[in-house]
Amino acid sequence: VGSALRVIPRELGELPLLRGIDDDELLEALADRFEQREVGEGQRVVAEGEPAEHVFLVARGKATKTRLGKYGDRLELGVLAEGDHFGVHALLEPQGRWEHSVEALTPCTVLTLRRDAFEALVEHSPVLRAHLEALADQQRRPQDKHGQAAIELAAGHHGEQSREARHRLL
């Protein structure tokens, strides 16, 4: 409405943390808790090392994600644009810190959700609480580097066939 932006509740299902939630009332309540923030070109959205207390949705503009390299140089991790998000871990890690910085390349409009607002909703929503518990349970299971279920493999091959054994097969 005018310059005011609002999260589309159903689109919150795109966040990995909320994927699979079908409760429209819950998604609506979450959407209502997002706050709009304007960030000028060149301004920092978040700074590496500072406490991570918000999840961010980029509604307008472009921002760059960077971190300090091994030798003190700035490493560019990528560009965030409309529809991108970052900081979902901030909703679950009370002592979490930003592992990167985000700076606006153009004037940006971001929508933010504070961890305390999210936690208040978790307290009052059995659906959200059960969803987060199921996610936590899934994370405790063995996984590969892509977050997929780890599969144990066994191989029974011990050495190579002898030359004589190969010729007998021919």
Image (spheres, grey):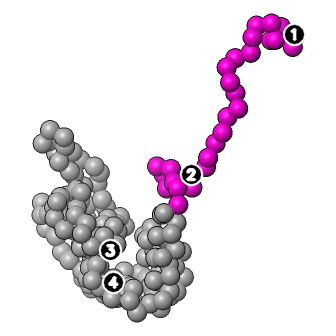
The three-letter amino acid code for the residue at tag 1 is Arg
Asked if the residue under mark 1 is in contact with the one under mark 2, i.e. CB atoms within 8 Å, the reply is: no
Q: Is residue 56 left or right of residue 38?
A: right
Q: Nearer the viewer, residue 151 or 57?
A: 151
Check disc 3: other Cα within 10 Å, few if <14, some if 14-19, many if 20+. many
Q: Earlier in the sequence, mark 2 or mark 3?
A: 3
Q: Distance between the residues labelled 2 and 4?
A: 31 Å
Q: How far apart are marks 1 and 3 (CA)?
A: 65 Å
x, y percentage for residue 61?
25, 65
The three-letter amino acid code for the residue at tag 2 is Ala
Range of residues picked out in magenta: 141-170
Rendered residue at 29%/85% (across/down) = 117
> Residue 150 — which label?
2
Rendered residue at 54%/82% (across/down) = 22
Residue tagged 4? 119
Rendered residue at 34%/72% (across/down) = 92
x, y percentage for residue 32?
34, 88
Q: Which quadrant, please, contains the C terminus?
A: top right
Asked if the residue under mark 4 is in contact with the one under mark 1, i.e. CB atoms within 8 Å, the reply is: no
In what element is the residue under mark 3? helix
> Residue 91 — which label?
3
